[in-house]
Amino acid sequence: MQKLPSFLDFVTSNRIVISPFVRIAFDSVRGYHVLLHARAPSDIDDSRLAGTSRREIPANFPLVSIPKEALLSASSSSICNVLPEDEITSTAGLILAFMIERALGSQSPWAAYINLMPLCEASCVRYWPKEMLDGLEGSDVLDIFRAAESALEDMYRSIVMPFFVKNELVIRQLLGHVESRTSEWDDLISYDTFTGAASVVAARCFEIDSFIGFALCPVADLFNHSDREQVHFESLYEVCEYCGASNGCEHESAKLLQTLIESSETGSPDTAEQSDSETDKSMPDLSDSGSDSGSDSGSDMSSSNPDSNDSCEIVTNEAIKLPKMSIFEGKEIYNSYGPLSNAHLLVKYGFALRGNVNNYLLLDRQVRQCYRKYNILWNSTDSTTDLQNPVELKVDYCGRVNVHLWDRIAQLAQILVKEPIPSHKSLQRFNIKPNTVKRTRINITIVKLILEILHDREIRYTDPDVSSIFYEYLIQDLPTTADSTAIQKQFTAIIFADEKQMLERAINRCKIFLGPDNL
């Protein structure tokens, strides 16, 4: 918490605006987070509150506004001039930029911001002890984790190390490592330093626009995640690809001028005269344009419009009621990191949510196994499904089958029973009220195959006979503390409770359709 005053000074000096409705807080469990700071709108001088209730924050109201120039990105970092052009907007470029800015210490313009961050996201499964990691065997978590680790190793080998080798002298001079080799340099380019930085960046970065790409966004990254969020992140994505301008620039004007010239050269004389006329009316004189002109234009826009497209914002989804008594100040305000399952949340962010409505269970491996069992080649059907993406083949939180899984199994059933594939109305009915689906031979075969796949998924667990209810009780019995082992046990129990519940719901859906005669 002692780092917060310096960060708030950084916020002020970089013209980041935090609404009086919210405040930044810290505790040992949640880390830095954002709380509702109850103040009546009448106490706040903001024209956007005119005509609203005195006891609520209106919908579409910006709680935080961050100028894009305050963001930590590859293009704004100390190494922007030596980064490969194709990495400027990528996560790899942002990770490299973050590694260097952190190594610069107090010399970095983002030092006070970086000081809020850990060396690594220790709650992510990558940093769990082996015995706790082994306890996740059979879950989707380990499949996603192994894929993420493989991607990190490839990034380090193909992008990060070649960058450091090529630019070693320049970076050592930037950091003051003038000797041929130092322990600081070896530590900076190590795989552990890279993966630690990658975990921090992955947990905090936002996609900003087509010019910046990915960036770290001060204050916006302090909002924790919920699947029932009250706010969202906004940033204008379509900007000039050369300079990032959002409201017209010399590049856009030059591109338009070139288009008009090409049009006049290929068109009729009348078209050419029209193009020249349009050029005279709409095109600025580029001979006088330059950085000064661009700066003046941006300054005018920013000063006249507080909701400038040159800023990112955290905006309310809908009206938020303010508490009537100050004793209730402290309600946390949540953002959403996306419709992510608990397995993805645990791998990337280091937490899981009980009852996550965005949960799903991956079944790609079991579907392929089913094809092998019936000696059908995986690519032998006319499928429009993206077969290389395991996320496409799944059941959701309610045990509903997604369209790609249904189509894949329907194609297998068609080969087995030689009947036409049913329309998606059968799937829709199956997911809403399974006993209303027509019990045709092809439908019965599809559902039996799905049930077979679900049972195959069930036996992946080390405790296939243990139901989700067991883990429900386990979650209630586990202590709620800041101890890392207790937290890891809690998240493990949540993962298994939710995955097994999804399986149970999907299996029950199949059994309702099939009835006792077809089981």
Image (cartoon, grey):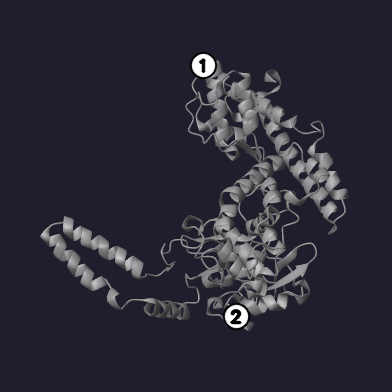
Q: Position of residue 200 (x, y in %)?
A: 67, 59
Q: Residue at x 51, y 34 (%)?
A: 385
Quarter of the image for the N terminus: give it: bottom right
Q: Position of residue 386 (x, y in %)?
A: 52, 36
Label 2 crowding class (10 Å Cα cut-off): few <14, some 14-19, many 20+?
A: few
Distance (Cα) linking label 2 and label 1? 71 Å
Label 1 crowding class (10 Å Cα cut-off): few <14, some 14-19, many 20+?
A: few
Does residue 226 show up?
Answer: no
Of residue 514 and residue 370, the one placed in the foreground of this image is 370
> In the picture provided, is 284 more to the left or to the right than 55?
left
* Amino acid tagged 1: Lys
Which one is closest to the eye, mark 2 or mark 1?
A: 2
Q: Earlier in the sequence, mark 2 or mark 1?
A: 2
Picture quarter containing residue 14? bottom right
Position above or below: 195 against 6: above
Picture quarter containing residue 493? top right
* Residue ID for mark 1: 418
Of residue 113 and residue 470, the one placed in the foreground of this image is 113
Q: Residue at x 56, y 72 (%)?
A: 70
Does residue 346 show up?
Answer: yes
* Residue ID for mark 2: 13
Q: Dot 2 lies on which element?
A: helix
Q: Position of residue 149 (x, y in %)?
A: 66, 46
